[in-house]
Image (spheres, grey):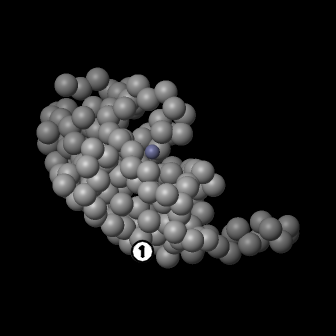
Amino acid sequence: MDPALLGTLTLGNEIDATALDTPERILEYFRSRNFIGNGCTSIEGAIQENPELELAYEDLGDADAYIMKISDNRFRIAVNSRHHKNRQRFSMAHEYAHYQLHRSQIGSKPEGERILYRNGERNQIEYQANKVAGEILMPEREFIFCISNSAGDVRAIANFFAVSPEAVRVRASQLGWNIL
Ligand SMILES: [Zn+2]
């Protein structure tokens, strides 16, 4: 057998938390570590457990969050301490997506960014980070189950996933559902 392939298979039980470059791999890892318990994703837990990441709550003024490189293989994710917990969770997931997918482009200065609800986002990187954030916080399987069980009640779905109603609407439209 190809030694490289053997390495991959051996790692099967132990997924490398620092190298998850697709939403599918991120979700596989989250499930393996029980970060998706009962539907609601513990993005906080996934960040805090990652040896390369640290999580901070700071007053960021108008900005939602930032991710910055502290040193080789070390990054800080900060979210706005004044924002609602659910909004902070989306911001964390967005920055976490940058860490997994756009790591080489993360700078060493804290550049706060505005994140939420940009479904019409044209910047490819930001669009992708938002999309992945939605996929992490509202995994398709759980999301469809929840829509069916709540008769499309956006507030109930948002409460279930601890996200904003707007994030639910965006996720629903991505999956081809039209809900109010
Ligand atoms: Zn971003």
Residue 166, position in %: x, y? 24, 34
Residue 40 lies, with reference to residue 146, above or below; the image says: below
At label 1, the amino acid type is: Glu
> Where residue 108 sits in the image (x, y, percent)?
54, 60
Q: Residue at x 41, y 54 (%)?
A: 66
Which residue is painted at 39% across and 45% down in the image? 113
Q: Check disc 1: other Cα within 10 Å, few if <14, some if 14-19, many if 20+.
A: few
Element type at mark 1: helix
The image quadrant of residue 13 is bottom right
Q: Can you see residue 139?
A: no
Give the residue pinned by disc 1.
49
Q: Quadrant of the C terminus?
A: top left
Q: Residue at x 20, y 37 (%)?
A: 165
Along the viewing direction, whichever of 127 and 46 lies nearer the viewer: 127
Residue at the far right in the pictured view:
2
Image vertical order of residue 40 relative to residue 5, above or below? above
Instruction: From the viewer's perspective, tell me whether residue 172 is left or right of residue 162.
Output: right
Which residue is more in the foreground, 40 or 10? 40
- Residue that appears at 41% across and 70% down: 54
Between residue 108 and residue 99, name the one nearer to us.
108
Residue 10: image location, x then y, percent: 68, 75
Residue 154 appears left or right of 140: left
